[in-house]
Each structure stands twice: as C-alpha cells, then as structure tokens.
C-alpha cells in the first residue's frame, strides 16, 4: 500500500497484452498439422489420386494428371485451413469455389489470361461454363481429348472438390467409414465418366480397396477407447491381413468366373445422344454437277484444294454417305447402327487434335489448304483412317471448336464451312487402293439401307449375276456391267443429253436402270451401285471425294464418287469410280433420245445451288428445306437467348445464386423453428422444460459459445454468464484512504478526483457516496451487469428447470409457459451480445443437429466420455475441448470445476483483480 493509502494495482494488471506478431504466430500455429492429420491427408491424396486415374482413357497424354494433382493439393490446402480455423462447411466450399476461379485459369486452362497469369473475364466465363455443362460436353466429345484447352478445367475441378470433401469429412467427423463416402463416390464418378476401356483395373480395384480398408482400420483404432486400444492388436492385424489376402485372390481369380462377369462396363458416354444433327446439311452427292464441265458454277478447271504430303493415287474423301431415304444418299447421324463393334453406332462428336483410331496401312501426315475462291462446304476433306486433325491459320481455334467427326465413316463436319486461307494437317493410316477388283473377297452380310423398295433393280441385276456364285463375285460382276453404260453430265443447254437429269432418288434410279442404255455421271452410277450391293446382301455406302493430281492440286474435274463395301472384319474397302463408271468420253447414243423424252420429257436440270437435304425432312420436302435455310425468328420473350447479356448475367449469376442461398437459409431456420415448436408442445411437462433448457444450450452452441458438455444446468448457466457478462466486479476494499469503511470522513467535492497529493479530480473510477452512508460506489468495468444493461441471468432459469424436472409433482402448463417465456428472454439476451455476422453464422449452423439427437439425448457427450484420449492433453478440435475466457471447453473431459477455477484465475490475471464466483 502506498503512502496515500491507495492499494497498489495487482501484478496481473501489469501484464502486457500480446503483440500483433504474437497474435499472428498464435493463428499460424493453428495451421501446423498433427500426426493424425498428416495421416488423413496422405490417405486423401492416395485415394483421390486413384480416382483421378479414371481419366486416363478420356484424355491424351499426361497433362491432365498434373492438372488434376494440382487441383488435389489446392483442395487439400483449402480444406485444412477451413478445418484449422473451425470455419463453417459453407465457408470451406466458398473457399474451394474461389480457388477454382482464381487458380484454375493459370494452372489448367491458360486461355485469355492477363499478362500470362491473371484470369480475365473470359477465363471466368469459361471456367463457370465448364463446371456446369462442361461435363456433358466432355461425354459427347470423342476420346481421347487433348490435354489442353477448356477441358483441362474438369480434372482440376475433380481433384479440388474430391480432396476438399474427403479431407474435410475426415477432419470434421470421427467416423471411420464416413470418411470413405467421398473417395468411393469419386471412384464411381471417374468410372461412369470414362470410356468402355478400363483405365487401370488393378489400381482402381485392388489398390483402392487395400488403401481404403487400411485407412478405415487406422481411424477405427484412433477412436477406440484407451482401455481397449491395446487389447488384441496383433490378432486384429493378422485377421485383417488374412481377409485382405482372401478378398484380393478371390477378386482376381474367382470374380471373372462369376455369372455376369463378362458384361461390359456401364458408363454414361454411350447412353448420351449428342445434340449435333448432321442430317440438316445437304448431301454433297446431290450437288455433284457443280463440279462438271457444262455447269454455271465453272468449277471444272478451278483449283479447289492443295494437298502436300499425300501419296499418289490416295483418294481424298469429302464425305461418306451411309444413309438412303429414297431421295438422296446422305450422312446419317449414327453409323453402323445395330451392327459392328458398337451396336449403338458411332455419331458425330467433338474431337481434339488426337483421335483414337487404328487402321491398316502406313501412317501419313499431309496438309490441306484452301486457295482463294476454292472449296467452300461444311464437309471436311480427309483421307484414310484419321488419327489426328490440327487446324492452322487465323480461324484455327474456331474451326477446332466447331468440328464434329465420325470415326467410323472418317467424315468431318464444319458448320461454318471452310473458307479461303484455311488449312489443316491430317494424320492417318492409308493404303494404296487396288487398281483392279480382287477375284475373291470375304465381305460382310447385311445392308445399310431398306432393300424392300429396291425390287426394280432385279430386272437388270439378275442377268448380270446369274452366271456367278458368291456375294462378292456378284458385286464385282455388277461393276463390270455398269462400265458398259454411257457417261453424261446432262450436256449443254439445248443438247440432246438434257433428258438425263441429275439426282438419285428412287424415281431417278428406276429411270436409270430401266433405260435402254445406262447413262449418267458419278452421281447416278455410284448411287445405283451402292443400292445394288445392298440388294445383294453386301453393306455398301457412297463416298464423295477427289483423287489429287500430280503436285497435290485438286480441281473440280478431279471430284469423283465411289462406293465402299464392308468386309467381314468390319473394315471398308473402296471401289473407285474408275472401276465401275464408264469413261467420260463415252457419251450416250442419240437413238435412245426419243424413248427417254417419252418417259421424262426434255427438262432443264435445276441449278446446283438448290441441293436437297441429305434426308427426307417431311411430306413437303421443299417447304421444309426452305425452313432449314431460313429458320423462323424466335421472338419469345421467355427464351433467355433473346435477352441482353447483362440481364442473363444478372439473373443466372446473381439472382439465382442469391435465391438458392435464401432458400437454404430459410430451410435451416425453418428446421430449427420446427424443432423448437416440437420441444415446447410435445411430451410430458417435465420433458418440455428439459427441451426449453436444451434450446438455450443449442442457441449458445450455434454461436460457438463454450458450454461444458458434462456439466449440470447450473454449471452450464454459470459458464455462459461468465462468457457473455465477463468476470464479476471486484469486491470493494474495506479500507478506503486509510480508514475503515463506514468511519466518519470529511465531505469532499464529488467532482474532484483523488491524486497522489490527496486531491480529487473529475471522472474518478470511484466516487464517494454521501457522507451519511460512508460507502464507495465502484463503476463497473466492461461486461459487468448494470441497471442499464441487464445481465444474462441464466442461473435462476437453470434453477427453475431443475426444480420443475426433479420435483415430485409434474409442473403445470402455466409454469411451463412461464419457463418458456424465460427461455425466449434468455435466447434474445444471448443473441443480443453478438454481431450481425455472428448471428448469421449461428442461424445457418448445423452443429446442434449432428451433435445430438432431436430428443436432446446427446451423442457428442457420449463419444467424449468413451474417448481413449480422456485425461490426455491434445490439441483443441472443432467444437470439442476448446477453451475460452471462461476456462471451460465444450466437451473437454476432466474436472469441470477445476477448469472453471483455472479459467477464472486467468480472467482475473487480465484485470479482474480477484477470483470471480464461477
């Protein structure tokens, strides 16, 4: 005590508060993982990595693997930070979404970046698009897809979400099996999103199972009570190893012999119907006369394409036409439907620079270029069995995105058409076409078209083939017979050849086959020959293409149509036009002019620009074709495609997510309201009182307040009061200025505060009361109850609850209603001390739903009482064992009173001066 009689401040008041560096070090120390956490992280990396292996057959190369592993590490880091700081699960998911948008662009996509590393608006748009409909586009694309471009966002997202979910569940829930839900779901997703070819059966089967079982055993052993943890450890290890060995051997040796083991893999890719409809494009065979000499298009001597690197005599294919509807030969949406290796057929799909295809012959790489005024059509000229397509020029990115390719017909479609200056490189396996038809050939059985309407062919085919046996021999005999006909392109205007019309519909084919002398060009001969082959039971299709001249120049006169027949090994052999089409100099005889005019009349052929569509579009074909060329304008205001960009962005990226968040918020609040109503209205009167106290505790736990899980109601009430109201005020000293409290003392001016010289000054922490009382009124510090600010006062509520529950008589309904009124008042006071964001976090918290049953019988305390770490010092875990200034953990085992005494002591060291009443 000083000479002035004023007590010296306690030593605890002289303690310096922690510096900013110390506070930062404390926060960073939370990020230091423990050994169990490192073990969980290691198993997460292994299991998610094995699930990621399922993309091996979907992507080309190994770029997808490094991108997926990068996403895995980012997701692991985001989940660890969220768990270390005990953030809500929603916050962790938001962090993962932010990491995806900020890091996926520079790591995986690398398109439209600013300065090479900063994502732009286009990058964000691409990432959002790939996260939602991008999976469907990947399934409709032809594997393997290039390990570059927008599709790389999907492996990154897969690894990011997989690691965040797996490690987050392992950190937040102690269940041994629960941590395997996410890895197993990821494994199933990688298989379903893959291809029919397994990526790695041994790794994704046996290795995944062994790692998953090992992780489950470790987590189960970690949660085992301390008294049972060492019992039978050797026996359990031996038993586990034996079961794993039996399961592994049985899976590899017995599994393939079980019923149903020979079935193919179930994946989503074959079941999806690609939205691309190739039948809307006109058949290139219908416009064959634009390449002939007497035509207004004047493309007969015009250079259409230049090819460099293609061997001599190897034909360039424009399109393979495998569908005939009675009007035209066109490209079908599905090739080999119901036949071939894939019964569901192959369709036109988006492809990358690499195409998974194999074929006979040698590998050749050639570059195709479009000169000024050259080839301009939707059909992409290729050759052989295509294994790679790489576009160049200024439109390379656009053409790559627009290309749709069918690997069975080796036909590509570009909706934007090729234009002057476009070029691309084709890699394919090619064979030199046979100069003569083989005498014997093993062909397939069946047909690609409906042959029921082709009976008119029999009048000519029967005499041609009645002297030979065998399907192929008959097909070869028909080729020789067709060469006896004449060649005509319709002639110049006013020529006698005008009676020979273009087209290859059933009517035109009937006129062609029943004429005295066969007369037509490649269009009629190839169409008729393919129909005859199908009539004979040999699958055949028509191909339009060209045979480049020396130097790789392709002109209109080089464009030809030929036929391909299917062999028994599911490959297709070309029969070039020179092997069944008459020589171009062999014109039809004028003697048949009058007979043909009687049948058809002298007509002028329609212009080449009016090509019919590749399939029949409806009863009125001309009307439907006009609608295809000029589709009706959609003015529907409800169609989002007609809205401005800012409105779509506001609706789909702002209002819709906000509405989803509001719905989730309302659902959680509604669930808590229903629980509170059930506690108040169901069960006996004492049960309703218990539910009321449970509601107070749940409100505090949602707000992250420390509540002793094993404490009594009185202890819980005191802990919450100490947390909310702070330590109680220090008791006034019985000695004031050297005199005993209550002794006579001179009256002083209350506005003068006491100084070291014995004077008083205004604004004193202690003001003398009137002289007749002789008492000192101490101004309360922060958090101390005053008349203007009522305290939490939970102890009386807890005492009332005990009285109602343990009383002999059941409480009345009026007493229960009064008790619940106190409950609502207490809840308002508890929430009134929190900020807006703390209240919002408490509103959406689900911890009170998962930590105990709705009836109030807690699972969390039971787990804490049986924990094998009871009584040991361990790092604080989310929601358990976390100490506050009250000194009480939410579920820390041990002496609760001792914890409160320790907490009170620590509180007094910060300025309370004396131990509070805990």
Image (cartoon, rainbow, N blue to C red):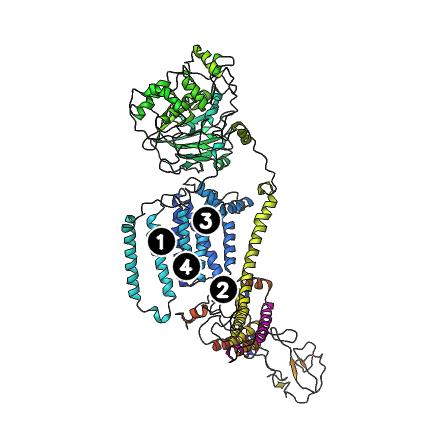
Label 2 sits on a secondary structure element that is: helix
Expressed as whole percent of the image width and height from the top left, the position of residue 486 reads: 41, 15
- The reply to whether residue 312 is in sight is no
Mark 1 in CB contact with mark 4 (< 8 angstroms): no
**Among numbered discs 2 and 1, the one appearing first in the sequence:** 1
Q: Nearer the viewer, mark 2 or mark 4?
A: 2
**Which mark identifies residue 208?**
1
In the displayed structure, would residue 642 be above or below residue 542?
below
**Among numbered discs 2 and 3, the one appearing first in the sequence:** 3
Q: Nearer the viewer, mark 2 or mark 3?
A: 2
Q: Image point 56% across, 52% down: which residue?
A: 657
Q: Nearer the viewer, mark 1 or mark 3?
A: 1
- The reply to whether residue 653 is in sight is yes
Q: What span is in magenta?
A: 804-833
**Among numbered discs 3 and 4, the one appearing first in the sequence:** 3
**Among numbered discs 1 and 3, the one appearing first in the sequence:** 3
Q: Image point 68% across, 89% down: which residue?
A: 744
Label 4 sits on a secondary structure element that is: helix
**Which mark identifies residue 849?**
2
Expressed as whole percent of the image width and height from the top left, the position of residue 44 reads: 40, 56
Q: Nearer the viewer, mark 3 or mark 4?
A: 4
- CA gap between label 1 and label 3 equals 21 Å
Q: Circle 4 sits on which residue? A: 179
- CA gap between label 2 and label 3 equals 33 Å
Q: Circle 3 sits on which residue? A: 156
Label 3 sits on a secondary structure element that is: helix
Residue 821 among those drawn in magenta: yes
> Alpha-carbon neighbours of circle 2 within 10 Å: few (<14), some, or many (≥20)?
some
Q: The N terminus lies in which quarter of the figure? A: bottom right
**Left or right position of 531 against 720:** left
Mark 2 in CB contact with mark 4 (< 8 angstroms): no
């Amino acid at each position: 005590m000083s000479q002035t009689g004023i007590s010296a401040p306690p030593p605890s008041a002289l303690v310096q508060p922690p510096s900013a560096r110390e506070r930062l070090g404390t926060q960073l120390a939370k990020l230091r993982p423990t050994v169990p956490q490192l073990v969980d992280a290691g198993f997460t990396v292994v299991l998610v990595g094995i699930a990621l292996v399922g993309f091996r057959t979907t992507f080309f190369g190994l770029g997808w693997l490094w991108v997926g592993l990068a996403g895995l590490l980012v997701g692991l880091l985001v989940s660890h930070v969220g768990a270390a700081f005990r953030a809500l699960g929603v916050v962790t998911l938001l962090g993962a979404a932010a990491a995806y948008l900020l890091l996926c662009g520079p790591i995986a996509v690398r398109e439209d970046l600013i300065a090479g590393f900063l994502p732009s608006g286009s990058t964000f748009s691409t990432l959002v698009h790939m996260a939602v409909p991008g999976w469907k586009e990947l399934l409709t694309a032809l594997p393997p897809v290039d390990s570059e471009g927008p599709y790389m966002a999907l492996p990154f997202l897969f690894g990011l979400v997989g690691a965040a979910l797996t490690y987050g569940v392992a950190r937040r829930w102690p269940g041994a099996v629960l941590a395997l839900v996410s890895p197993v779901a990821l494994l199933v997703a990688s298989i379903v999103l893959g291809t029919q070819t397994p990526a790695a059966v041994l790794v994704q089967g046996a290795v995944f199972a062994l790692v998953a079982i090992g992780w489950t055993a470790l987590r189960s052993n970690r949660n085992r009570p301390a008294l049972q943890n060492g019992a039978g450890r050797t026996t359990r290890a031996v038993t586990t190893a034996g079961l794993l060995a039996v399961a592994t051997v049985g899976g590899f040796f017995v599994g393939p012999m079980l019923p149903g083991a020979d079935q193919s893999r179930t994946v989503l890719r074959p079941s999806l119907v690609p939205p691309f409809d190739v039948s809307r494009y006109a058949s290139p065979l219908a416009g064959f006369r634009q390449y002939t000499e007497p035509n207004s298009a004047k493309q007969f001597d015009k250079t259409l394409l230049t090819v460099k690197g293609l061997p001599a005599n190897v034909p360039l294919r424009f399109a393979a036409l495998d569908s005939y509807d009675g009007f035209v030969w066109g490209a079908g949406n599905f090739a080999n439907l119901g036949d071939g290796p894939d019964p569901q057929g192959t369709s036109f799909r988006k492809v990358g620079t690499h195409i998974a295809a194999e074929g006979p012959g040698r590998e050749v790489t050639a570059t195709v270029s479009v000169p000024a005024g050259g080839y301009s059509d939707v059909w992409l000229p290729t050759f052989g069995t295509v294994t790679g397509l790489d576009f160049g020029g200024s439109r390379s990115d656009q053409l790559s995105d627009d290309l749709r390719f069918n690997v069975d017909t080796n036909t590509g479609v570009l909706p934007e058409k090729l234009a002057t200056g476009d070029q691309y490189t084709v890699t394919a396996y090619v064979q030199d076409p046979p100069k003569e038809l083989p005498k014997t050939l093993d062909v397939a059985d069946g047909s690609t078209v409906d042959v029921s309407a082709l009976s008119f062919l029999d009048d000519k085919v029967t005499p041609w083939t009645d002297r030979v046996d065998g399907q192929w021999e008959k097909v070869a005999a028909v080729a020789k017979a067709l060469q006896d006909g004449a060649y005509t392109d319709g002639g110049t205007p006013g020529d006698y050849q005008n009676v020979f019309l273009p087209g290859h519909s059933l009517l035109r084919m009937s006129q062609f086959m029943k004429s005295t002398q066969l007369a037509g060009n490649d269009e009629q001969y190839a169409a008729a020959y393919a129909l005859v082959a199908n009539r004979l039971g040999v699958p055949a299709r028509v191909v339009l293409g060209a045979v480049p001249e020396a130097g790789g120049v392709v002109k209109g006169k080089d464009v030809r149509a030929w036929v391909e027949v299917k062999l028994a090994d599911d490959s297709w052999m070309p029969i070039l036009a020179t092997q069944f089409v008459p020589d171009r100099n062999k014109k039809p005889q004028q003697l048949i002019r009058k007979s043909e005019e009687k049948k058809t009349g002298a007509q002028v052929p329609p212009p080449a620009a009016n090509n019919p569509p590749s399939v029949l579009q409806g009863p009125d074909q001309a009307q439907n074709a006009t609608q295809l060329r000029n589709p009706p304008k959609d003015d529907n205001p409800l169609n989002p495609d007609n809205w401005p960009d800012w409105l779509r962005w506001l609706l789909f990226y702002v209002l819709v997510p906000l509405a989803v968040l509001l719905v989730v918020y309302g659902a959680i609040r509604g669930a808590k309201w229903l629980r509170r109503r059930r506690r108040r209205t169901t069960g006996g009167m004492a049960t309703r009182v218990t539910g009321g106290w449970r509601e107070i505790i749940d409100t505090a736990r949602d707000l992250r307040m420390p509540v002793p899980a094993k404490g009594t109601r009185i202890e819980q009430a005191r802990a919450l009061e100490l947390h909310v109201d702070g330590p109680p005020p220090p008791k006034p000293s019985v000695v004031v200025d050297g005199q005993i409290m209550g002794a006579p003392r001179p009256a002083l001016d209350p506005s003068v505060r006491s100084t070291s010289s014995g004077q008083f000054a205004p604004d004193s922490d202690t003001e003398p009361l009137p002289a007749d009382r002789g008492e000192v009124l101490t101004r309360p510090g922060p958090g101390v109850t005053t008349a203007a600010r009522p305290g939490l006062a939970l102890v009386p509520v807890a005492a009332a609850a005990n009285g109602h529950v343990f009383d002999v008589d059941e409480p009345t309904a009026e007493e229960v209603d009064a008790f619940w009124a106190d409950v609502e008042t207490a809840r308002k006071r508890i929430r009134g001390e929190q900020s807006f964001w703390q209240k919002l976090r408490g509103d959406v918290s689900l911890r009170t739903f998962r930590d105990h049953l709705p009836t109030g019988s807690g699972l969390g305390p039971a787990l804490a009482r049986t924990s094998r770490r009871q009584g040991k010092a361990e790092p604080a875990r989310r929601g358990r064992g976390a100490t506050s200034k009250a000194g009480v953990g939410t579920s820390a085992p041990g002496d609760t009173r001792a914890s409160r005494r320790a907490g009170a002591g620590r509180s007094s060291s910060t300025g309370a001066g004396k131990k509070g009443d805990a």
